[in-house]
Image (cartoon, rainbow, N blue to C red):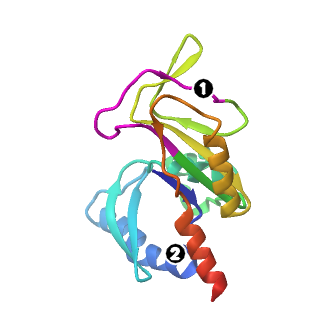
């Protein structure tokens, strides 16, 4: 489990397809049915031969996608929330950081089935960004108590560098039965390589 942002295949052509075929019809459809929506709407999309298809809708932020999206916002999340509440979204300008963010999910072995709990986590510090999802603070020590325990973030101007940074940060952390995927971002790198080879 993990995510990276931005996705290299999400070019201007694909962006227009997603907006025109999915986002705008979804918003118009909700309004037409008398249920205009204000809030988080996460749309899970699959790309098949260059065309976007909806897998699911969620009325919440995506996980682990939001862990790489939010840090890419130069001005943070608050101006977006404020514009939604104040109905000024049309005037909103979203400024994003240059480069790439990558997150690697550290999970407890056995997840999503049975897994051990209350393992002491070591190696966390403020030198890198980490999101907690299955942890507990006891006597100033952090313990793993959930299936998905931590989201470790890496950042760099290149996707390759961001992946490397994320896994360097992962190597600093340890808890019993910790496991994680080692291929986060590789599809993006393969895509970039294919584009540069053409």
- Residue 122: numbered disc: 1
Does residue 35 appear to the left or right of 123 in the view shown? left
Residue with the mark numbered 2: 15
- Which part of the image, by quadrant, shows the C terminus? bottom right
Residue 8 in sight here: no
What residue range appears in magenta?
A: 105-124
**Marks 1 and 2 in Cβ contact (< 8 Å):** no
Q: Nearer the viewer, residue 9 or 195?
A: 195
Residue depicted at x 38% and y 61% = 44
Dot 1, crowdedness within 10 Å: few (<14), some or many (≥20)? some
Magenta stretch contains residue 106: yes
Residue depicted at x 35% and y 39% = 111
Q: Secondary structure at mark 2?
A: helix
Q: CA distance from mark 1 to mark 2?
A: 41 Å
Q: Counting residues from the N terminus, which is met first, the one under dot 1 or under dot 2?
A: 2
Q: Residue 35 lies in what quarter of the image? A: bottom left
Above or below 179: residue 65: below
Residue 164 in sight here: yes
């Amino acid at each position: 489990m993990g995510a990276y942002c931005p996705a290299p295949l999400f070019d201007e052509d694909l962006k227009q397809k997603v907006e025109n075929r999915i986002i705008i019809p979804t918003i118009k459809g909700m309004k037409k049915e008398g249920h205009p929506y204000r809030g988080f709407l996460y749309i899970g999309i699959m790309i098949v031969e260059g065309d976007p298809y909806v897998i699911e809708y969620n009325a919440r932020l995506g996980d682990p996608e939001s862990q790489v999206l939010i840090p890419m916002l130069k001005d943070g999340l608050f101006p977006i929330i404020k514009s939604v509440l104040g109905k000024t979204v049309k005037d909103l300008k979203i400024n994003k950081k240059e480069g790439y963010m990558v997150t690697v999910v550290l999970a407890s072995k056995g997840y999503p089935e049975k897994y051990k709990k209350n393992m002491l986590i070591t190696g966390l510090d403020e030198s890198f960004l980490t999101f907690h999802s299955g942890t507990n603070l006891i006597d100033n020590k952090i313990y793993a108590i959930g299936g998905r325990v931590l989201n470790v973030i890496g950042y760099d101007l290149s996707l390759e560098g961001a992946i490397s940074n994320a896994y360097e940060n992962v190597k600093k952390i340890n808890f019993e039965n910790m496991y994680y995927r080692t291929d986060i971002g590789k599809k993006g790198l393969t895509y970039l390589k294919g584009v540069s080879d053409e």
